[in-house]
Image (cartoon, grey):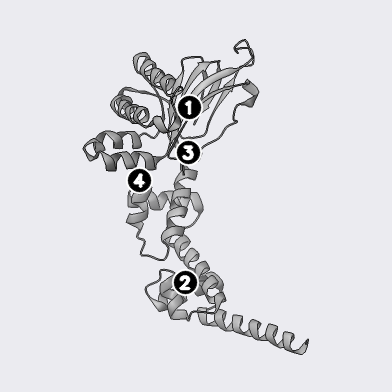
Amino acid sequence: MDLYKFEYKRMKPCEQLPLHRQDSWELTYIVFGRGKRILGDSETEFAAGSLAFIPPHIPHCWKFDDNYTDHDGCIAYYTLTFKTEFIDRCVSAFPELTERLERVKSVSSVLSFDENTTNILAEMLAKMASEEQSEMLPFIFRLLLLLSKREESATIVGRFSENDRTSERIKKVKEFTQSHYARTITIDMIADHVGMNRSSFCTFFKKATGQTYITYLNKLRVDRACYLLRQGSFNITEVCYMVGFNDVPYFNRCFKNNRGMSPKEYAEGLLTKRQIVTDRQFYNK
């Protein structure tokens, strides 16, 4: 997995990426061209010298005007992308800079900077364009430190729209739940994971999905239980604990609420179907 990537792009305006999002941070500086850009919930004009620092998962694109190109009909820009894991590794290597680097991770909106900061960043990006990929690490580290120093005075030029923020939070909830359903998950734990308090999270999740989080969690666990029962390798008590339930009677109730039958009835039905298939295979020989 690439933790960071730097590119100097020179291309026709029509070759630009459409509206997209990614799981990495992005710093883009426009060298040549102008047009309109979509950054989260905003659409604004841009020109050469424009710069944007974009957090992960915010939809964005740069719509270059065909009438503003160089003599070859091209536009040009620098783009640096890096993973959150890259910041975490920098923290591990330089724990004394933890507070500063965590400031970068706390950025949740698209930022632009004053002229002085933009010029410094642009100069560093221009120097990176003449370096090998393996030689860029010192530049990127310096960029991170500069961003952490200037983020408080930066200007917000784009945010998550409400729909984007809701979708992102629900995605984080589901990814966390699908990865940890076999362990104990509390409301406080999942609320903290998406940066909300318990009460706000419960209201948010119910409004966004039409069900409580516990209902969603139990349904997921029952679905996994059905999968394990279909394997035929585990008994009901084993499956109960394997999917995160810590009480067999409660597991039985949740299973029946979701499937309309008890785990025992479900398992016996599977055995009956297997026997029918076996009998058919025997008599068809």
Q: Earlier in the sequence, mark 3 or mark 1?
A: 3
Q: Nearer the viewer, residue 139 or 200?
A: 139
Of mark 4 and mark 1, the one earlier in the sequence is 1
The x, y position of residue 180, in whole percent, is: 41, 60
Residue at image location 44% in from the left, 58% down from the top: 179
Q: Earlier in the sequence, mark 2 or mark 4?
A: 4
Q: Nearer the viewer, mark 2 or mark 4?
A: 4
Horizontal and vertical percent position of residue 65: 61, 17
Work out how far the residue at label 4 is from the one at label 1, CA to CA, in angstroms: 29 Å
Q: Are marks 3 and 1 in contact (CB under 8 Å)?
A: no
Q: Nearer the viewer, mark 4 or mark 1?
A: 1
Are the residues flagged by discs 4 and 3 in contact, CB closer than 8 Å?
Answer: no
* Distance from Cα at disc 3 to Cα at disc 2: 35 Å
Q: Earlier in the sequence, mark 1 or mark 2?
A: 1
The secondary structure type at the circle numbered 4 is loop
Residue corresponding to mark 2 = 254
Confirm whether residue 199 shows in the render.
no
Left-right relation of 80 to 274: left
Residue topped by disc 4: 195
SS of the residue under disc 1:
strand
From the top left corner, tell me how far across and down residue 21 is, in percent. Answer: 52, 37
Residue 273 appears in which quarter of the rendering?
Answer: bottom right
- Identify the image quadrant of residue 114: top left
Residue highlighted by disc 3: 57
Quickly name the residue at label 1: 79
Of mark 4 and mark 3, the one earlier in the sequence is 3
Q: Residue furthest left?
A: 96
Local packing at callout 1 (Cα closer than 10 Å; few below 14, some 14-19, many 20+) is some
